[in-house]
Amino acid sequence: MERGDFELPHFAESDSTRALLKVQDGCSAMCSFCIIPFARGHERSRTLNDIQREVEILTARGYREIVLTGVNIGQYAHQGRDFCSLLRWLDQAADFERIRISSIEPTTVSDELLEFLASSKKFCPYLHIPMQSGDDQILRAMNRRHTIKSYINLIEKALVTIPDLGLGTDLMVGFPGETESSFQNTLAVATDLPFSYLHVFPYSPRPGTAAMRLKQRIPSASVKKRADLLLDLDRVKRLAFHNKQIGKTVSALFESGTRAAYRFGTTPNFARVGITGSEDFRNQILQVTITAATDRYALGHIVPSQQVNCAMVAR
């Protein structure tokens, strides 16, 4: 691939503890609501040599975690190397404590991928798998390539295969033709599946997309009401996920600065953890015992022996 055919990402901000590593761009799926195939073009993958060069740069900059990104990341393919073989190479070659996969389409999550994530010590037990709708008729109108049955089967298999999996999804409301019954199907599936969080989006018409030709538009008041119901469910899901962490001792990669008197870190399964204290633990991975939870984050304290060691290093 020519370098000009691939739009490289900006490096992460200097105070970030996670760096983004873009390995794929473009999409050929042609979901009816999405402008990306027109704006970003066909699916294309970054060369291994190019990935390796950026991995070396990010390692030298001291990042502890990288997040693999792409428009349709599971479609990575270059010179006979597919997405799973790329992950295996990174697992062996990349000098990071953590590697995380960003959003990935359900049709590209294979049994091989799930088994790899379960066995790897570097790759985080975390998946963000867009569902978009819990209604098969709406999924067909969206030109999505999965059914609700296949999606539920995938999630159930992922939860069985990967211990302590953090699981997120995208949900779109107000897609043309989404009846109250269609929305209730989405609400029911989202309620039943043990998501850690929900990203909720109202449908937004994009000129040039197939969905623009659909006439059954949903009143804005109905879209807002449906979005609010899913956002309420999101808060319930986040609280349940954080409550599940209480009593556990987890590893957290800490960010810089404080917010609301807390210093925050992120666990491998993408739970946000807050601790009190004046010490700056930026870019350190420390063991934290979780003692409480809110719908925004879990709360805990650093395992005491580590706190002593950190203070000695600081001196």
Image: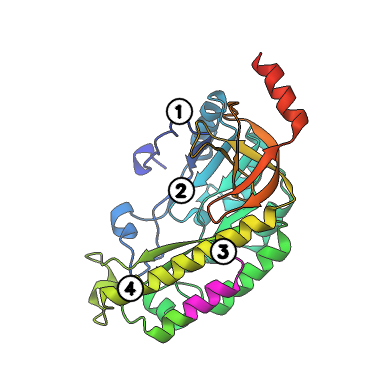
Q: Is residue 152 magenta?
A: no
Front residue of 9/131: it is: 131
Relative to residue 201, is residue 14 depicted above or below? above
Determine contact: label 1, label 2, CB under 8 Å: no
Quadrant of the snapshot with the N terminus = top left
Counting residues from the start of the chain, the first of labels 2 and 4 encountered is: 2
Residue type at mark 2: give it: Gln
In the picture of the structure, the residue carrying the numbered disc 4 is 223
Residue type at mark 3: give it: Lys
Front residue of 12/262: it is: 262
In the picture of the structure, the residue carrying the numbered disc 3 is 237
Q: Is residue 187 magenta?
A: yes
Determine contact: label 4, label 1, CB under 8 Å: no
Residue 159, visible in the rendered structure: yes
* Residue in the picture at 57% in, 54% down: 294
Of discs 2 and 4, which sits in the foreground? 4
For mark 2, give the secondary structure. Answer: strand
For mark 4, give the secondary structure. Answer: helix
Relative to residue 116, is residue 210 depicted above or below? below
Query: Which mark, by number, is residue 24?
Result: 2
Residue 312 pos. (x, y %): 71, 17
In the picture of the structure, the residue carrying the numbered disc 1 is 14
For mark 3, give the secondary structure. Answer: helix
The stretch in magenta equals: 185-196
Determine contact: label 3, label 1, CB under 8 Å: no
Residue type at mark 4: give it: Val
- Disc 4 and disc 1: Cα gap in Å? 39 Å
Residue 164 pos. (x, y %): 70, 56
Counting residues from the start of the chain, the first of labels 3 and 1 encountered is: 1
- Disc 2 and disc 4: Cα gap in Å? 33 Å
Disc 2: CA contacts within 10 A as few (<14), some (14-19) or many (>=20)? many
